[in-house]
Image (cartoon, grey):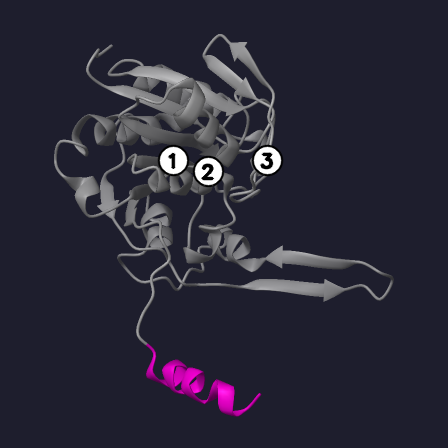
């Protein structure tokens, strides 16, 4: 363990998740790691924030009765304010595509950290699903997360010193499940823009929402081009997307013109 590098580790699957423990143990080889993670599953809550949260000591650090964003705020402000970086993961299930960035609790923890000016890495594992075993029952062994933990360890050791976070506020990492002996290569990517959410009304008061992208991934029917996060993971690579947290703004002449005529129309 290195005395010079300190990390806050959180997630959205809960502090006792297999992927969380796998990442904690791997990162502890190179850093002083303190867990500040949800006490239970908080998947897909985005940046939902609480006013008050209960905290209890855990053998890895602290368990919070709250969301990933709660954990980052509580961790950086009250429990471990002196860390070099925040790592969120390893999530069981990929967080791929631009449309999931605001939905994922894992990614949202990294975004929350970025607003504190603390570098962050969000880490997720792509579980293909299909076959006889439901995807929820797969990735039950820490070894299944080997590609994700190895890549994250490498980035933690090298990205800070290399100046990566002078241009990016956080990294969104997605890794395929481990196969064979060697690690999967890293590819620097951009989030895919493919979006195929559907909604079906059964006529009896229920509307079913469905993300068809997962069906296409299982069928190897992905139109994403080279260089996108989803294409990299489907091709067996570790996707690393360097991202910025604040929403960008641009000058809009048409909107300026509307503002100038507002008082003349009301």
Residue 260: quadrant of the picture: bottom left
Q: On the image, numbered disc 1 is attached to which residue?
A: 123
Residue 259 within the segment the image draws in magenta: yes
Observer-side mark, 3 or 2, equals 3
| Nearer-N-terminus badge (1/2) | 2
User: Is residue 227 depicted above or below 77 in this figure?
Assistant: below
What is the spatial separation of the Cα atoms under label 1 and label 2, in whole angstroms? 7 Å
Local crowd at mark 2 within 10 Å, few (<14), some, or many (≥20)?
Answer: many
Q: Position of residue 156 (x, y in %)?
A: 24, 28
Region in magenta: 252-266
- Marks 1 and 2 in Cβ contact (< 8 Å): yes
> Label 3, on which residue?
50
Which of the two labelled residues, at mark 1 and mark 3, occupies the earlier sequence position?
3
Q: Which residue is mark 2?
A: 106
Magenta-colored segment: predominant secondary structure: helix
Which element is circle 3 on?
A: loop
Percent x, y of residue 187: 24, 46
- Residue 158, quarter of picture: top left
Looking at the picture, tell me which residue is in the foreground, 124 or 128.
124
Quadrant of the drawing holding the N terminus: top left
- Pinpoint residue 18: horizontal percent, then vertical percent: 49, 21
The mark closer to the camera, 1 or 3, is: 3
């Amino acid at each position: 363990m290195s005395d010079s590098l300190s990390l806050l580790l959180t997630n959205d699957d809960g502090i006792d998740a297999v992927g969380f423990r796998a990442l904690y143990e791997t990162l502890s080889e190179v850093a002083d790691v303190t867990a500040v993670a949800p006490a239970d599953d908080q998947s897909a809550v985005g940046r939902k924030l609480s006013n008050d949260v209960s905290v209890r000591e855990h053998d890895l650090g602290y368990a919070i009765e709250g969301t990933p964003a709660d954990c980052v705020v509580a961790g950086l402000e009250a429990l471990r304010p002196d860390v070099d970086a925040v790592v969120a993961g390893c999530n069981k299930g990929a967080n791929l595509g631009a449309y999931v960035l605001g939905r994922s609790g894992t990614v949202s923890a990294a975004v929350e950290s970025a607003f504190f000016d603390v570098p962050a890495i969000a880490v997720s594992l792509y579980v293909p699903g299909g076959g006889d075993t439901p995807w929820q029952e797969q990735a039950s062994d820490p070894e299944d997360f080997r590609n994700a933990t190895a890549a994250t360890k490498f980035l933690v050791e090298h990205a800070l010193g290399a100046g990566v976070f002078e241009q990016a506020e956080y990294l969104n990492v997605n890794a395929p499940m481990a196969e064979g002996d060697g690690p999967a290569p890293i590819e620097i990517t951009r989030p895919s823009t493919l979006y195929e959410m559907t909604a079906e009304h059964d006529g009896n008061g229920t509307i079913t929402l469905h993300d068809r992208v997962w069906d296409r991934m299982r069928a190897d029917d992905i139109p994403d081009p080279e260089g996108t996060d989803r294409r990299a993971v489907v091709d067996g690579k570790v996707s690393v997307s360097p991202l910025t947290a604040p929403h960008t703004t641009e000058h809009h002449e048409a909107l300026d013109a509307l503002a100038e005529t507002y008082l003349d129309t009301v």
